[in-house]
Amino acid sequence: MHRIETSLPGVWELRPKVFRDSRGFFMETYHRERFAELEIPCSFVQDNHSRSAKSTLRGLHYQLHHPQAKLCRVVEGKALDVAVDVRLASPTFGKYASVLLSADDHNQIYIPGGFAHGFLALTDSVQFLYKCSDFYDPADEHGVSWNDPDINIPWGMPDPLVSEKDSKFPRLADIPREFLPHYSAK
């Protein structure tokens, strides 16, 4: 497994070793000891799988009291995956990092807790898998507007398919501070 830095400290692109032969391929997508060697201090408790049609944008979501670190990958198609730092007092508050995830490249993104997360399906069908470090609590879900002009994420698509719930998320500047996670320097 190879760890690649992004523009946000703690958000990493991961590239597993892929073993190919005439039968296909094999790779490890998660190995607790190898992740610890890469300084990814996370154990996961829940796996999620979504399928999205082209132009579907899901996000930007975060959990406040049950923050979820996420390990995301695409097993069919391509998606633009985005993490936004929404931690109050963070030096990168309001900044984003993005990684193009592809089933062909087998790459992943690791996103720590305290970041809002979303992705855009770029191909006709995208199957998106992700591990979470805490259980999903629907009462604890919060979000940031996918098209917040202050964050200015270049999605490359002016009118994606967005759920009604996601379309109602506020701009980051309009979220009451008590509904944002806090940054803690380690």
Image (tube, rainbow, N blue to C red):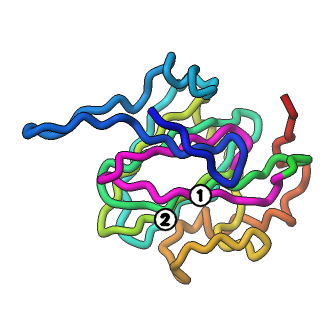
Q: Say if 114 sits above or below 59 in the image.
A: above
Contact? badges 1 and 2 (CB < 8 Å): yes
Disc 1 is placed on an element classified as strand
Q: Say if 106 sits above or below 119 in the image.
A: above
- Residue under label 1, please give it: 82
Q: How many marks?
A: 2
Kindly identify the residue that appears in the image at 65 percent across and 70 percent down.
Answer: 153
Q: Nearer the viewer, residue 163 or 105?
A: 105
- Residue 62: give x, y in percent of width and height: 68, 47
Question: Mark 1 packing: few (<14 Cα in 10 Å), some, or many (20+)?
Answer: many
Which range is magenta? 92-115
What amino acid is at disc 1? Answer: Val
Kindly identify the residue that appears in the image at 78 percent across and 51 percent down.
Answer: 86
Which is more N-terminal, label 2 or label 1? 1
Kindly identify the residue that appears in the image at 63 percent across and 26 percent down.
Answer: 39
Quadrant into which the N terminus falls:
top left
Q: Which labelled disc corresponds to residue 120?
A: 2
- Residue 23: give x, y in percent of width and height: 9, 37
Is 5 part of what is drawn in magenta? no
Question: Mark 2 packing: few (<14 Cα in 10 Å), some, or many (20+)?
Answer: many
Q: Say if 27 sits above or below 157 in the image.
A: above
Where, by quadrant of the figure, is residue 144 drawn?
bottom right
Q: Nearer the viewer, residue 173 or 178?
A: 173
Left or right placement of residue 172 versus residue 104 in this view: right
Label 1 and label 2: CA atoms lie apart by 9 Å
Quadrant into which the C terminus falls:
top right
Kindly identify the residue that appears in the image at 86 percent across and 47 percent down.
Answer: 90
Where, by quadrant of the figure, is residue 84 drawn?
bottom right
Disc 2 is placed on an element classified as strand
